[in-house]
Image (cartoon, grey):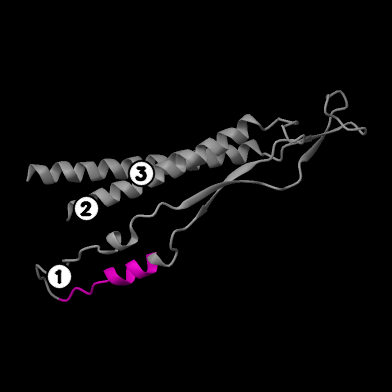
Amino acid sequence: MKVSTLISSMKISAAGLSLQRRRLNVISSNIANAETTKTENGGPYKKQYLSVKAVNPNKFNEILEKTKTEIKITNNNHLKMDPEFLEDTKLKIPEAEVKEDNSEPRLEYDPSHPDADENGYVKKPNINLVTEMVDMISASRAYEANVVAINASKGMFRDALEI
């Protein structure tokens, strides 16, 4: 295995770490503002989410087709595959953009609230804390998986140096 392949695997995992960190920041912002009824724009806080765009969604199928091997006999050259796809993709990091959810705010009846309308209803952000917590657990698990992948690559480096 080439050193560039191990470095590429670490770069991919690092991109995943960065993406999950951004996702956790957006989720924590949603949780912190779940009860914010008035923002600088005048209305209630709008839920945010991270929209991730795949770099090349068809690339996975191309890579899968290149790496298919039919083993007929045991041969040293049999699995001699160099993942040249890592070099020609230039390891582009997926584009991620923070967007606002444009769903209607939820109305809560509280005539004593300073932001209540003439009917006594307060417009509150359409944020479900349970959903946000599930998303947070999902993002933290994905973050942990990327850390494990980086540690596995480091272990391969260390083992290769011992040979």
Of mark 3 and mark 2, the one earlier in the sequence is 2
- Mark 2: give few (<14), some (14-19) or many (20+) Cα within 10 Å: few
Of mark 2 and mark 1, the one earlier in the sequence is 2
Residue wearing tag 1: 78
Residue 148's mark? none
Of labels 2 and 1, the one closer to you: 2
Name the residue at 83% across, 24% down. Answer: 114
Residue 27 % position (x, y): 56, 37
The kind of secondary structure element at disc 3 is helix
The kind of secondary structure element at disc 2 is helix
Residue wearing tag 2: 4
Amino acid identity at mark 2: Ser
70 w.r.t. 2: above or below: below
Question: Left of 122 or right of it: where is 101?
Answer: left
User: What range of the chain is rendered magenta?
Assistant: 60-72
Residue 127 % position (x, y): 67, 39
- Mark 1: give few (<14), some (14-19) or many (20+) Cα within 10 Å: few
96 w.r.t. 21: above or below: below
Residue 135 % position (x, y): 54, 42
Amino acid identity at mark 1: His
What is the spatial separation of the Cα atoms under label 2 and label 1, in whole angstroms? 21 Å
Residue wearing tag 3: 14
